[in-house]
Image (cartoon, grey):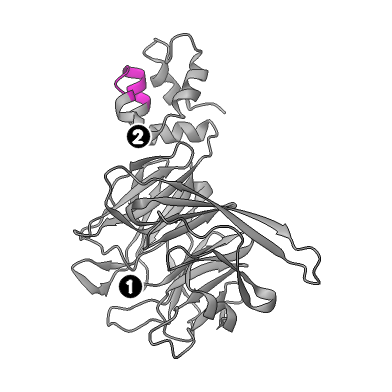
Amino acid sequence: MRLGKGFQFELYLQGEPLIPGLPDDVALNCLLRLPVECHTACKAVCKRWHFLLGNKERFFTSRKELGFKDPWLFVLAFHKCTGEIEWQVLDLTNFSWHSIPTMPCKDNICPHGISCVSFPSEGALFVCGGMMASDVDSPLDLVFKYEIQKNNWTVMKKMNTARSFFASGVINGMIYVAGGNSADLFELDSAEVMDPAIGNWHPVASMGTNMASYDSAVFNGKLLVTEGWLWPFFVSPRGRVYDPITNTWENMALGLREGWTGSSVVVYGHLFVVSEHERMKLKVYYPDNDSWETTQGPPLPEQICKPFAVNAYDNIIYVVGHYLHVAMGYISKRNQTGSSENKWRFSVEWQVIDGPKLSDLTPSTSQVLFA
C-alpha cells in the first residue's frame, strides 16, 4: 500500500534520508514500529522524524495506509484518592504504555457505572452513560467516540435515556444499551440502539423488568444481561436475553445466571467468566446442559488484584488489575475424547505484563483496538 500524496510530499520534502543507508520505504516501515512511549525522545533526531512522530494522528494514519494491524489495549482507569479518570494504552506488541487525550467532559465523571463498546478492526471505541462524580445519583446520557487514527474524541448524539450501571454490546455493527439506574434512583426497563454510521438512538423492546446490570455479553448474536447475586443471596439473580432479530426479550437460563459470578468474555464462541475473587480459575459455560466448568491450567496470577477490567480478542483474554498489571490468558481448546459427550475442553496459560511505572491506577473498563 502507498501513502497519500500529501503525506509523501511533506515527508520527503526535506531531502535527507530517514535513516542513512536505508531506502526511505524501508526506513519508514521501521519507524512506524517504534513504541509510542519512545516518540518524545525519537522525534528530536531530525525534522523528518519530528514530522512523523510528533503527531499521533499522522503516525497512526501512516500505519493504517501501510497495512499495520496490531492490537492495543485501552484501559479506562482512575486514581483511587482523587477519582480522576484517564485512559492508558498498552501496546500489545512492544508491551509499552502511553496515554491518550482526556475525554471532552464538562464535569468530572465517576469512573463507575460507565459502559464501553468497541469496533476493534475500525480502531474505534464508544463511551456511554455513567454518572457525575459530584452527584452519583445523576446518571448521564453522554456518548463519546474515540478513533485511534485521529487520536481524538468526538461528542456523539446523546442516548434517549440517561443511564448508569447498564448493559451494552455490539451486534451486527449496531450498539445496544439496556437497563441500568435512572435519574430518580429507580432501575430501568428500557433499551435502545444506535447505528454508529448515522448516530441516532432509537428505542427497542422493553426488557420486561426493571434491572441494573452487573455484567453483560454478546453471545450467539444475542445480548445477555445479568444483575448478579445480591445480598443476602436468598433469591437467584435475574437475567434477560435480547434477540435483535425478533426484537424480543426472554429469561436467561437458570444455570447461566446462577453461575455468572464475575466479568465475562467470549472466546472460541464460548462464554468465559473471570471470577470477581482473586486467585480463582477461569470457568466456561456449556449451553447444552446449562452448566459451568472450570478450565484447565493455573488460576489468575497473584499479581493481578481486584477490581478487574476484562476483555478479549481472538483466543486471548486480558485481565487488568490494580496498578494496571495485565494478565494475558492464552486459551487453547481440544475435543473431549473417550466420552459420549461431544464438547470442547479448554485450558489457559497466563502471562503477566507490568502496569505503567509509578502508577497508582485502578481499572474501570478495557477495550482492544487494532491500528
Q: Report x, y in % for residue 355.
A: 36, 46
Q: Report x, y in % for residue 5.
A: 47, 24
Q: Mark 1 = which residue?
A: 162
Q: Report x, y in % for residue 25.
A: 51, 19
Using the rendered view, name the quadrant where residue 363 is placed: bottom left
Local crowd at mark 1 within 10 Å, few (<14), some, or many (≥20)? many
Q: Mark 2 = which residue?
A: 37
Using the rendered view, name the quadrant where residue 233 is placed: bottom left
For the record, the magenta segment spans: 42-52
In this image, 218 relative to 100: left or right? Answer: right
The type of residue carrying mark 2 is Glu
Residue 198 can be seen, yes or no: no
The type of residue carrying mark 1 is Ala
Q: Which mark is residue 192?
A: none
Q: Is residue 355 above or below residue 203?
A: above
The residue under the point 53% across, 73% down is: 224
Using the rendered view, name the quadrant where residue 179 is placed: bottom left
How far apart are labels 1 and 2 at the CA level? Answer: 37 Å
In the image, 32 versus 307, the foreground residue is: 307
Q: Name the image quarter holding the N terminus.
A: top right
Q: Is residue 187 above or below residue 127?
A: below
Q: What secondary structure is marked by label 2?
A: helix
The residue under the point 59% across, 58% down is: 297
Q: Report x, y in % for residue 72.
A: 45, 44
Q: Main secondary structure of the magenta part?
A: helix
Disc nearest the viewer among 1 and 2: 2
Mark found first going from the N terminus, 1 or 2: 2
Q: Is residue 41 magenta?
A: no
